[in-house]
Image (cartoon, helix red, strand yellow):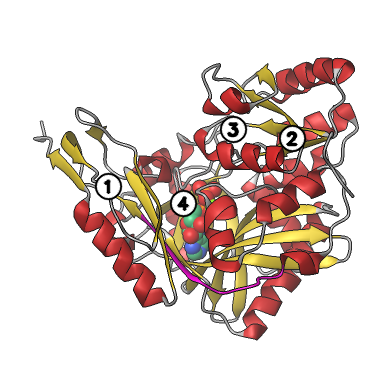
Amino acid sequence: MPVDGKTILIISGGVEALPIIERAKALGLTVAVSDGNADAPGFSIADFKIIASTYDEKKTAELAGELHEAHSIDGVLAAAADVPLTVASVAERLKLPGISVNSAKIVADKLLMKETFSASGIPVPWFSQVRNASHLEKLLKEKKALVIKPVDSRGARGVVRLVEGVDVEWAFEESIKNSPSCRVMAEEWINGRQISTESIVTPDGVMTPGLSDRNYEQLERFAPFVIEDGGDLPAILTEAESAEIDRIIGKVARAIGMKSGTIKGDIVIGSNGPVVIEVAARLSGGYFCSHTIPLSTGADFVGAAILLALGEKIVLDDYRPRMSKAVCQRFLFPEPGVVRKVEVPEIQEESLAMLKVYVKEGDEVKRITSHPCRAGMAVTTADTREGARAAIKRVFDRVTVKVEPLIPA
Ligand SMILES: Nc1ncnc2c1ncn2[C@@H]1O[C@H](COP(=O)(O)OP(=O)(O)O)[C@@H](O)[C@H]1O
Ligand SMILES: [Mg+2]
């Protein structure tokens, strides 16, 4: 069904939302953008602007309702923003397709999510809410490898592994201070390959064009924080493992009550198969949906999400990977200090798909405790994983971010 002439509301006008807004425009849609920052880059290419924080579901729904009376909106989609309640509130108020408020509540709360999954027979790690540091101390005596996390944060903020030498009180504080509702949970740490997944859910079935091996080779450098250093596509999985992931995401969709849309998953392949760490009922951030998946597979993942948000029927086969190119993404993590020099030369590298350096001279690089601390990012493609990794190294070798260490007080 042609969708040109329809209007979509994209929640977030941040820099990572730009490719999603651009894709909607390329499909012939009129695009409204909402963001709390009046200077958000997405507004410069939007047809309509709504100034409301992406986290403010009431205000966004109210202003979207006002716009809807003057100019009909046909769908709503969050772009690189973890705001399921805002999307669901707009969808409910404007009677649009999209996740229900109830589904949004489940995915916005890691404890409720795990309870729901566990009751539906979806494999999850052992978990428990943690009341305080002494409760955590007690759990640590019973379980051997634990990780704690705020039930309602993102970007690895406050996700702390209780490895040897970590002070339990400090860890609990670090976690709870990142929880808006002041709630912390503990989980058994599952050893195994860490996979990022991004799936398309339709009434006809589930397909997962996005499968990436997350790179945790710097886990010890950043311990006890859990900091991912990019990923490699395609993930190296057996057919049985990929099929099991589709089956699990199908169960996840049913458990949260989603009939169509996209699901981003954090999955670990444990000793008994895939285990769900968490899911998000939205498009991924970090350029996974907009760049690395299409570069690797040719699948127009964002296009699928836009059509589903408009309530259009799509054919899953149209998004089946058409190719399998190796894609490597890595982040720049300088040591903490003050940035004294940044040099990013023009790099003539055929395999280079994306290079971004976020820091400038004078900026302070803090200790890396969560994903927003990244100082830069590159994406390369090649025929082989080794080739894409070697290209990343060549690119980063030519980028200079010189940091003067801070002298501890
Ligand atoms: N129980 C666990 N076992 C193994 N890895 C985990 C576990 N919990 C978290 N992780 C790792 O830490 C990352 C961040 O934790 P997550 O619960 O996804 O929080 P966030 O919302 O901040 O992404 C996960 O994507 C996963 O790589
Ligand atoms: Mg996560």
x, y percentage for residue 223? 31, 56
Which residue is the site of mark 4?
136
Q: Quadrant of residue 128?
A: bottom right
Residue name at image x 12 percent, y 39 percent: 405
- Left or right side of 349 for 202: right
Amino acid at pointer 1 = Glu
x, y percentage for residue 401? 20, 43
Q: Earlier in the sequence, mark 3 or mark 4?
A: 4
Residue 87, disc: 2
2 or 1: mark nearer the eye:
1
Cα gap from disc 2 to disc 4, whole angstroms: 35 Å
Cα gap from disc 3 to disc 4, whole angstroms: 18 Å
3 or 1: mark nearer the eye:
1
Pointer 2 with pointer 1, Cβ within 8 A? no
Which residue is the site of mark 3?
181
Q: Is residue 23 visible?
A: yes
- Packing grade of label 3 (10 A; few <14, some 14-19, many >=20) is few
Amino acid at pointer 3 = Ser
Q: Quadrant of residue 310?
A: top right
x, y percentage for residue 232? 45, 67
Q: Earlier in the sequence, mark 1 or mark 4?
A: 4
Residue 372 part of the magenta-drawn span: no
Cα gap from disc 2 to disc 1, whole angstroms: 40 Å
- Left or right side of 223 for 409: left
Q: Is mark 3 within 8 Å of ligand 1?
A: no
| Circle 4 SS class | helix
